[in-house]
Amino acid sequence: MLDTVFFYLFTLLTLGGAILTVATRNAVHSALFLITSLLGVAGLYLLLHAEFLFAVQIIVYVGGIMVLFLFVIMLVNLDAAAAQRQFSRMWPVALGCVALVGLELFYFLGKGEPAFRIAAPPPVPEPTAGNTERIADVLFSQYLLPFEIASLLLLVAVIGSVVMAKKRI
Amino acid sequence: MPEGYVPLFIFLAVAILFPVVALILAKYIRPDVPSRVKLEAYECGIQTASDSRARYTVRFYIIAILFVIFDVEAIFLLPWAVRYQVLGWFGVAEVAVFLVVLAVGYVWAYKKGALEWI
Amino acid sequence: MLDSFIPSWAELLRFMPEIILSLVGSLLVMLEPVTGPKSKSMLGHVAIAGLIVALGATFVAHANPGAAFSSMIVVDGFATFFRVIVFTVGILTIFSSYQYLDREGSNRGEYYALILFSVVGQSVMVVANELIMIFIGLEISSIATYVLAGFLRDDKRNNESAIKYFLLGSFATGFLLYGIALIYGATGTTDLGEVRQAVLQSAEPPVLLLSVAAGLMFIGLGFKVSGAPFQMWTPDVYQGAPTPVTAFMSAGPKAAAFAIFLRIFVTVFESVGDRWEPLIWASALASMTIGNFAALQQKNFKRLLAYSSIAHAGYVLVALTARSEIGTASAMFYLAAYALMNMGAFAVIAHVAGKGETTVDVSDFAGLGAKQPVTAALLTIFMLSLIGVPLTGGFFGKFYIFKAALESKLLWLAILGLLNSAVAAYYYLRVLVVMYMEEPSARTENLEPMPMSLQAALWLPAAGVLFLGIFPSAVLEFASASARLLGQ
């Protein structure tokens, strides 16, 4: 019961934030509504017992990436953007896409569970450890190589962003 | 929903409700007599010279993106920290490799002066 | 429990080429700030040395095949084949970059480091046996390439190229990731071998989810290989990027993307092959047609080769449509030949382009045959190979692809593909006509002699193209053997 209430609460937060993000004219307000949306997603992770993802969502997305977004918004000339038409003239195309996705959704909802036969989740042993600990156990053993390679990805990102943005290199 | 989080949500709800209730309540019970002097900027401040949404310099962007990258790095250290004892020296070695690769980027950015303000 | 995960020496050996390149790349990054502006080319030499050592390590790894790191990677013939392609492309790119970067005043160590990291990403993609590894490799390769496309930051076209490539590329990556998520949802694993087993052993395979996943991954990968209808970005990005980087983009990342295309579609999605075959069929035909007919109109040589690269992606997609061992083998052979001939052709453009790439129209190549006969002769080899004239690698590439298509009863696709190649001959031959028959242009009139490094970037692929054209069987047999193992 409580779960359901929280689920709808977080969904409302996520979807409402997302709609307001695209609907507001002011880019800074958009960014702030995006934070709301991301917080809603974080709440959904918590409902799914994914505490680690919850922390990642808050620290990286709400903390880091949103700061970056706000800085970028402040970098560009917003007056020019605000003076433009709010909605692009392509909106009938977008409407068509949305209608198509909606139809698809109702089709699958109508067909029910067999349409998306999802693999049975692997049997989870009685939780002897929390979510973060279990992630640590696989990340540092089975997924050792992707973990190390990810550092290379971050290195390339450091070099790339400085090469692109720094005045004099 | 993990039951342990219910107090957290109650706390969150109170935290959100408190300023909302306080502000709404204040609006109805405070005396409201606006005048030109009262609406000015605070007396020890100076008059606003321009829009506060001025454009930033691109340096903020470099700092912000470096912050995000090292933020992600910190996230990867979190699971290691909670399993430090189980992972032992093997974990230390793994994280050392990870950090050395990132340190290369950090040293490079430092040498290039990407972290200097002027 | 942990002891079993400590990598053994054999496992490290299988991953050694990537380790070497990452170390050399990091070394370049550390050396960059301490080298003087005159000696940046030294860093390029270091990068080439690293790539050559990695090439050697590839063969050592191949002598010792198998999976490693909890089967995150697998070293098989297929992986070795594509590793050799991407490392060779890296070497040729750096050879053709020295003169270009000096001319533009942007000879910096970051360039070479980014090339190396991009190559590492591609190499990770081709050895990966796991969807998460594939994704990380793709991201490393793509991010490095986005930056390289805009490396001359003061050039407006470079900026346009980088921003277009970046925005569309990250969007496409999103589709790929969505596809990966659906595969995980359908089977509960991201290991390619386990996914395949899960689908084969399941009484009722999740056909719908897998088909949607195949479609989404097709969008993501179709973008990376510039197959229609996701080819829109190609001309602008290829035209705007620095010419050596264009050469690199059209060969390395494309070959790696095709490698994972083959690995995923041949192994994981084989069971739903009937569903995606029409999709790839249509995409192959559209890529060939759009690429070839648009190339007919181009005046700019780089744009012409960009459209031709769309058309060539179409030919490889024909091989994919065949869904057979010989189809896979012919795609591998074709990608090797295509990487070589394209690298060579772009190296000639990098030579003729001039500062700021002001002379890259086909008409600027007029009289090249009289002024620099050797350069012109080498460009002729590459053009003839792109057409698919016998005795060049391009001929056997096309030959095997259409043979594979016919064996898989794709008669119409083969006929339409052959007609397309005939159309393509027109615009390649036009370049030769301009080069040999017309009076020298202002650019070829006072063309500086070709430096040693650029000569290496021309002679090596020319030799490779002729080798593939005269002795195709050695490479093809290797490709067939690898394809057979892949399908098991």
Image (cartoon, rainbow, N blue to C red):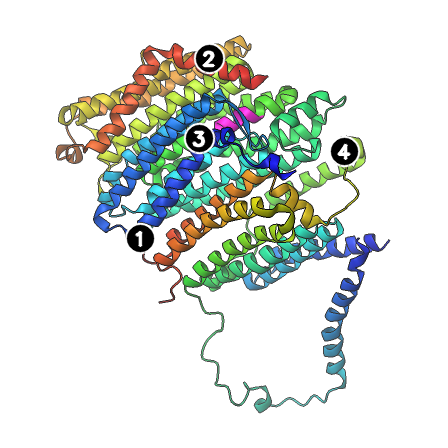
- Give me the disc on residue C33: 1
Reading the image, the residue beneath label 2 is C402
Residue C135 image position (x, y, % from top left): 54, 37
Q: Along the polypeptide, which appears first: circle 1 or circle 3?
A: 1
Label 4 secondary element: loop
* Amino acid bearing label 4: Ala
Which image quarter: residue C116?
Answer: top left
Q: Is residue C252 magenta?
A: no
Reading the image, the residue beneath label 4 is A120
Camera-near label (2 vs 3) is: 3
Q: Are marks 4 and 2 in contact (CB under 8 Å)?
A: no
Chain of the residue under label 3 = C
Label 2 secondary element: helix
* Amino acid bearing label 3: Lys
Residue C271 image position (x, y, % from top left): 65, 20
Magenta segment boundaries in residue numbering: C253-264
Label 1 secondary element: helix
* Amino acid bearing label 2: Phe
* Crowd class of label 4 (few under 14; some 14 to 19; many from 20; radius 10 Å): few
Res. C332 in view: yes
- Give me the disc on residue C254: 3
Q: Are marks 1 and 4 in contact (CB under 8 Å)?
A: no
